[in-house]
Amino acid sequence: MEADAVRRYENVARIIEGARFEIVDFWRFNEKSDIWNFIPHAHNYFELIFFLDGNAQISLENRSLYATFSDALLYPPKALHTEHLQINHRQEIYCLQVRCADIRIYEVLHIQDRHQQIKLILDGLFAEYNSPACDAHVVDTWMRALATVMARNYFFPDAPAHPVETCMMYMRHNLTREISIRQLADLIHVSRSYLNQLFVRHTGVTPMQYLLDIRIDAAKSLLMTTDRRISDIAEDVGFHSPKYFCATFHRRTGMSPREYRNSEGLGRLSGGETPDARAGYGRSYGESMLVQ
């Protein structure tokens, strides 16, 4: 780490510790929402856009940005911006609007969330903010964690991920959704045939084979550790036809899901316990920083 980056980050972290945050609004919406604003606009508060799915071209006053899966864009107050997206394609974002007089940022920040830490914090913050028992102290803790992690990711960005690893991460975090070769190719800006070549070279299997493998592995975990119905497990890991799930599972493992559960899972647990700790597995949830 460069000494100057360390110094600047530590300065920002100290300011965040004492900052006061006020959430204006917090949404999670998709391409069908009427919240999208496709004309040039600005706000008198900070706005954080986090891409859970999809992509957009962003026009600013003096440049443009391209944002895609796991990207965060932070607009400072009064920053004029316009989002251009393909509204007929899948889009899902978090939009967090916050007032904070203690932090000064003078340019739009584009931050990549390669390890899904920003997403995990946004998931927790969104759940707390929308809870009937919402606790202001918990919200404040989430906000400080979010600001600090974003600052760290900005000052110390990771080396660019391999494009195949980007696709693999996307698949792991979107198991329940329909995922096509075209979607994955668009994600890393290559043709479908070239994506297949890259994937086989990097992993030894095609993208669709990899997706099937992780879905079956997720199903195995659920069969071993929960008593959920097989049809529900099929849905949890992205199979919208229980019949197709059972046929695919048998073809990949040599056993039906029920046979696998009896031989590897609940049938071997002592005391008749049926833990459901992983029942939610596979569900997807819902430039410079210059600080004075």
Image (cartoon, helix red, strand yellow):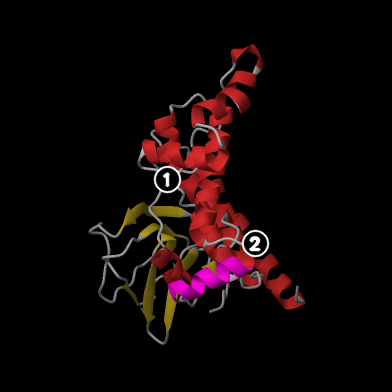
Magenta-highlighted residues: 191-201
- Magenta span dominant secondary structure: helix
Rendered view: 242 above or below 121: above
Disc 1 to disc 2, how far (Cα)? 40 Å
Which label number is shown at residue 238? 1
The residue sitting at 56% across, 56% down in the picture is 116
* Residue 161, quarter of picture: bottom right
How packed is label 1: few (under 14 Cα within 10 Å), some, or many (20 or more)? many
Front residue of 222 and 285: 222
x and y percentages locating residue 203 in the rendered image? 62, 62
The residue sitting at 42% across, 85% down in the picture is 63
Say which residue label 2 marks: 13
x and y percentages locating residue 65 in the rendered image? 44, 78
Rendered view: 10 above or below 265: below
The mark that comes first in sequence, 1 or 2, is 2
x and y percentages locating residue 108 in the rendered image? 47, 75
